[in-house]
Image (cartoon, helix red, strand yellow):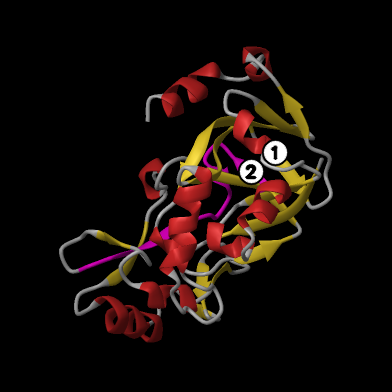
Amino acid sequence: MRVDEIWRYPVKTMAGERLQRVRMGQLGIVGDRIVHVENAAGRVITSRTHSRFLGHKGVLGPDGEPLVDGRRWDSPEVAADVADIAGPGARLVRYLGVERFDVLPLLVATDGSIAAFGHDRRRLRPNIVIAGVEGLTERIWPGCCLRIGKVLIGVQDLRLRCIMTSYDPDTLMQDKEITRDIYRRFEGKLALNCFVIDPGWIAVNDEVQLVRGRACIEPADTGVFEEYSRS
């Protein structure tokens, strides 16, 4: 198995950037989802309810600050776009806490399950796509770990999918039948909720090894595993 694609989403709920090499920290890919949208009441807003955000792209600038369609995330122009989509008082907020992730800091998908899904992999919004996986083999990986060089990733469980999978990442046209099909054929779950045990660098084409059993987290910090397992 090998790393086929790496994706980072500096602005939560917007389109992300495809990378060749990236540093993995304790909270997933460095720079991932460090800015999110809040409405006037301070509640987090996503493309589940405001799909137009998927039409904007977030990337990490050279200074480590996100850019939205090439503009600084905190610029007046971006602020106007956010308010236009989510209403007066909506704004982008920079936040680095673990709560910025919907489930766990890392979402891993495999080429076998993507092929079975039969649609654009971007609908699943993975951080890492692993190639060389037969069929739906990923479904038996929870409880195992993935070794990529010095990086060790724990696999917790399968990701329950939401309505965002129904939106075409290019046209933003919605097809709810795609989401319904995930529930009919895959019990509503595709790709894997994961967390980082040993941080480091990963790159496209790096070898991926599956490590089974609790031995996969030794000699890593098991406290991290336990923290996420309770979430």
Q: Is residue 36 magenta?
A: yes
Would you say residue 99 is visible in this rendering?
Answer: yes
Label number found at residue 200: 1
Q: Position of residue 119 (x, y in %)?
A: 62, 64
Q: Secondary structure at mark 1?
A: strand
Label number found at residue 64: none
Vertical comparison of 110 with 77: above or below: above
Q: Is residue 188 magenta?
A: no
Q: Residue at x 54, y 63 (%)?
A: 123
Q: Residue at x 51, y 23 (%)?
A: 225
**Looking at numbered disc 2 in the image, what kind of residue is underneath it?**
Met
Vertical comparison of 74 with 105: above or below: below
Q: Quadrant of the N terminus?
A: top right
Q: In the rendered view, does 89 fall on the left or right side of 117?
A: left
Marks 2 and 1 sit apart, C-alpha to C-alpha, by 5 Å
Q: Are marks 2 and 1 in contact (CB under 8 Å)?
A: yes
Q: Nearer the viewer, residue 135 or 201?
A: 135
Q: In the rendered view, does 208 fall on the left or right side of 121?
A: right
Characterize the local packing of mark 1: few (<14), some (14-19) or many (20 or more) Cα atoms within 10 angstroms: some
Q: In the rendered view, does 31 fall on the left or right side of 134?
A: left
The residues colored magenta run: 23-39
Label number found at residue 24: 2
Q: Position of residue 197 (x, y in %)?
A: 60, 28
Q: Quadrant of the C terminus?
A: top left
**Looking at numbered disc 1 in the image, what kind of residue is underneath it?**
Gly
Q: Position of residue 161 (x, y in %)?
A: 45, 51
Vertical comparison of 26 with 183: above or below: above
